[in-house]
């Protein structure tokens, strides 16, 4: 699946100045989500998904000794495109 908009990743870095470790963990996971939008530990958010057109998912990534990184993305089935909706420290 191709990654579409990943601007939220860069906006998160500018906004929250996460550690290099947190950035690397998030970047690796985002690349994995581009290939497998259902990658663990993600869960669907049914209330904002519109099956069978698109699905919105979220994941909480562990960063040892730091706040978790939360990600949300949309996967459009027809095109296979995955767009990041938000990235935050939690």
Image (tube, rainbow, N blue to C red):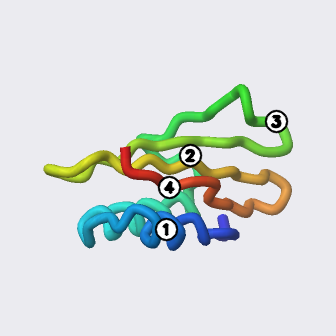
Q: Position of residue 62 (x, y in %)?
A: 28, 47
Look at 17% across and 51% down and name the residue there.
Answer: 64
Determine the secondary structure under disc 1.
helix
Label 4–label 2 contact, CB within 8 A: no
Label 3–label 2 contact, CB within 8 A: no
Q: Return the disc, 4 or 2, that comes first in the chain's sequence.
A: 2
Q: CA distance from mark 3 to mark 2?
A: 15 Å
Q: Return the disc, 3 or 2, that comes first in the chain's sequence.
A: 2
Q: Return the disc, 1 or 2, that comes first in the chain's sequence.
A: 1
Q: Return the disc, 4 or 3, that comes first in the chain's sequence.
A: 3
- Residue 50, numbered label: 3
Image depth: mark 4 or mark 3 in front = 4
Q: Callout 2: few (<14), some (14-19), or many (20+) C-alpha neighbours within 10 Å?
A: some
Tag count: 4
Q: Callout 3: few (<14), some (14-19), or many (20+) C-alpha neighbours within 10 Å?
A: few
Q: CA distance from mark 1 to mark 4?
A: 14 Å
Look at 72% across and 26% down and name the residue there.
Answer: 47
Image depth: mark 4 or mark 2 in front = 4
Tell me which corner region of the image, top left, top right, bottom left or bottom right, holds residue 78.
Answer: bottom right
Q: Position of residue 11 (x, y in %)?
A: 53, 68
Q: Residue 13 vs residue 78: left or right? A: left
- Residue 31, numbered label: 1
Q: Callout 4: few (<14), some (14-19), or many (20+) C-alpha neighbours within 10 Å?
A: many
Look at 69% across and 69% down and name the residue there.
Answer: 4
The residue closer to the viewer here, 86 or 26, is 86
- Which residue corresponds to mark 4? 87
Q: Position of residue 2 (x, y in %)?
A: 67, 70
Look at 32% across and 64% down and name the residue there.
Answer: 18
Label 1–label 4 contact, CB within 8 A: no
- Which residue corresponds to mark 2? 38
Q: Return the disc, 1 or 3, that comes first in the chain's sequence.
A: 1
Q: Residue 14 vs residue 78: left or right? A: left
């Amino acid at each position: 699946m191709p990654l579409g908009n990943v601007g939220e990743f860069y906006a998160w870095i500018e906004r929250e100045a996460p550690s290099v470790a947190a950035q690397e963990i998030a970047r690796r996971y985002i690349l994995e989500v581009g290939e497998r939008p259902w990658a663990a530990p993600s869960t669907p958010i049914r209330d904002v998904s519109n099956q069978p057109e698109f699905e919105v998912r979220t994941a909480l990534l562990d960063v040892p000794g730091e706040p978790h990184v939360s990600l949300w993305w949309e996967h459009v089935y027809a095109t296979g495109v995955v767009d990041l909706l938000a990235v935050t420290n939690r």
